[in-house]
Image (spheres, rainbow, N blue to C red):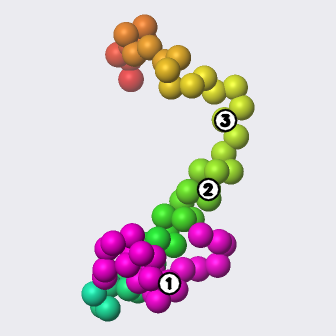
Amino acid sequence: MSSAALTPAEAARWAARAGLPLPADRHAVVAATAGHIHSVVAVLRELDFGDTSPALAYRAEQETHDAAV
């Protein structure tokens, strides 16, 4: 999806193409939801994870717990 907002007609077309036909009253809601998801993902793409290790490197059993509040 480009940076342009998804229109209700486009949302209906993409849903139908995926085999999920939408009732006419759902087109605008689906388009708005897709736009929101797109904006959240766009923010996540901007994050710099730099030296962050992959999830496979994390070992929960090695974590030390401190009960102090």
Q: Give the numbered dot on residue 40.
A: none
Q: Is residue 26 above or below residue 66?
A: below
Q: Give the numbered dot on residue 43.
A: 2
Q: Earlier in the sequence, mark 3 or mark 2?
A: 2
* Distance in Å between CA atoms under marks 2 and 1: 23 Å
- Would you say residue 25 sits in the magenta stretch? no
Residue shown at 30% from the left, 91% from the top: 25
Residue holding disc 3? 49
Residue holding disc 1? 10
Q: Circle 3 — which element?
A: loop
* Distance in Å between CA atoms under marks 3 and 1: 34 Å
Q: Earlier in the sequence, mark 2 or mark 1?
A: 1
User: Looking at the image, is mark 3 or mark 1 nearer the viewer?
Assistant: 1
Kind of residue sitting beneath label 3: Phe
Tell me where the magenta segment starts and ends, as one range. Answer: 1-22
Kind of residue sitting beneath label 2: Val
